[in-house]
Image (cartoon, rainbow, N blue to C red):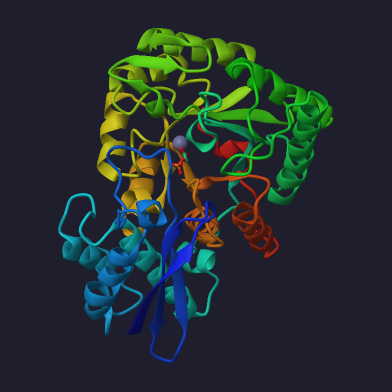
Amino acid sequence: RITEVTPRRVWDSRGWPTVEVDVTIAGGRSGRGIAPAGASRGLHEAVELRDGGEALGGKGVAAAIEAVRREIAPALIGRDVQDQAGIDGLLVALDGTPNRSRLGGNAIVATSMAVMFAAAADAGLPLWKHLAGATVPKMPLPQIQIFGGGAHAGRRIDIQDLMVIATGATSFDRALEMTCEVYHAAGRIMAERGLLQGVADEGGWWPAFENNEHALDTLVRAIERAGYVPGEDVAIALDIASSEFGKDGRYRLALEDRELSSDAMAEMLIGWLDRYPIVSIEDPLAEDDEAGLVAFTAAVGHRVQIIGDDFLVTNAGRVSAAAKAGACNAVLLKPNQAGTITETRAALAAAQAEGWGTVVSARSGETEDVAIVHLATGWNAGQLKVGSFARSERMAKWNEAVRVEQTGLAYWGPTALKR
Ligand code: PGA
Ligand code: ZN
C-alpha cells in the first residue's frame, strides 16, 4: 500500500528544472521517478506542464509539483503499489485531458515511474527482474550516438543523431568497449581537422561539418580508425528527426540551403543507404508525411530498420494504424511521450504483435534516472537508445546496463534489429 507521494523540483542534464517523485509504501520501502525532457518533440506526445513567464526560461515546474501534492498524492495513498495499470489509469482519468496538459505529463510520468520502482522494491527485486516476471530476458542491443546534430546542436547539421551499432559484439559489455574506441577515434579526427568544439546535448561530438554527408563520411572514418570494419563490426544508425525541418511535404536542409520534396528527401536517404553501412533509420520523413513514410518503407523496409518516433509518439493505436498502412517497421518507446508506464507497455505490445522492432529510448534532457535500462531489459524489448558515450546522465544508464548484464543475462545482439 502506498503511504506517501512526495514530489520535488530537481534539475536535468541541460540545467532546466524537472519533476522528481518519491513513492513510499507501508514498511518504508520506496521508489523514485524523474521526468526526462525532449527537445525535438512530436506533435502528438503528452505535454509537460511548465510555469511560463520570465523565471527559469519559462520552464519552471511549480504547477506540476503542486499537481502531485494536491491531486495525485491524495488519490494514490492507500493504493496497491503492484497495481501499475490501475494506478496509471487513475492518473490518466484524474488528468482528464487527451494530452496530460492539466496535471502535466512531467508530473504524471515521474509518478508512474516512481510507482514502478516502488513495486520492484516491494517485491525485493531489481526492476528489470520484477518487470520480466517469468521470462528470462536478454540484454538489449545499444544504439550509441557519436555526433549530435539537429535540435541538440543549434541545428548545426540537419541530421539529429549519427549513431553506431556494434553489430560484431557478442555482449553488451563488448558493444560498449567497441563504441568507446569509435567515440574517441571520432574525437581525434575532429581534433586533427581543427573541428573539435565540444559536445552536443546528448554527449555526441559537436557537428562542425560542411554538410550531412561530411558527417557520415567522418563517422565511417572513425569506425575504421578504431580498427573496425564498417558494416561488419560496427554499423551506422541514424535519427533524421525530419519533423524538425520538414512540414507539408517540404524538407528544408538549412546547411545546404535547399528545399526537397518528400520524394527527393526519400531519394537522398536511399542514396545514403546505398553508400553507407546504415542498418537503422529513425524518422526519415516528417510526422505529418504518412504517405512519404509508407513509400519509404515499401522501398527499403526489407533491408533497413525504419523507426517511428515523432510519427508514433509511443502510442499503441498509432503503432497499429501505421503497421496497417505500411509505415515503419519499428517503434521508439519513450515513457514520457506516452504519459505512463502502462501506455508505454501497450505501445510495445502493439509493435510486438506486428513483428516490429522495439527500441526503448532516453530523451535529450535526462538525469541520473536509469528506468529505461530496466524497461528495455525487463520487457525484453531488444534495443536501447540512450544518447552518446559521454556526460553522466548517459553513462549512468550504460553503467547500469553493465551491472544488469553481470547478473548473467544473454545478449540480443543484431538479431534484435528489424530488417
Ligand atoms: P528529444 O529527441 O528527446 O530531444 O525529443 C530524441 C529523439 O528524437 O530520439
Ligand atoms: Zn528521434
| Residue situated in front as seen by the camera: 111 or 245 | 245
Q: Quadrant of the N terminus?
A: bottom left
Count of numbered marks: 0
The answer to whether residue 14 is left or right of residue 166 is left
Point 23% across, 76% down: residue: 70
Point 65% across, 54% down: residue: 395
> Relative to residue 288, is residue 398 depicted above or below?
below
> Relative to residue 223, is residue 175 depicted above or below?
below
| Residue situated in front as seen by the camera: 88 or 252 | 252
Which corner quadrant of the image does residue 400 belong to?
Answer: bottom right
| Residue 413, position as x, y percentages in the image | 64, 41
The answer to whether residue 152 is left or right of residue 171 is left
The answer to whether residue 289 is left or right of residue 253 is left
Residue 133 is at least partly visible in this image: no
| Residue 113, position as x, y percentages in the image | 41, 65
| Residue 339, position as x, y percentages in the image | 31, 54
Residue 67 is at least partly visible in this image: yes
| Residue situated in front as seen by the camera: 4 or 278 | 4
> Relative to residue 219, is residue 315 depicted above or below?
below
Point 54% across, 54% down: residue: 13
The answer to whether residue 125 is left or right of residue 330 is right
> Relative to residue 114, is residue 196 depicted above or below?
above
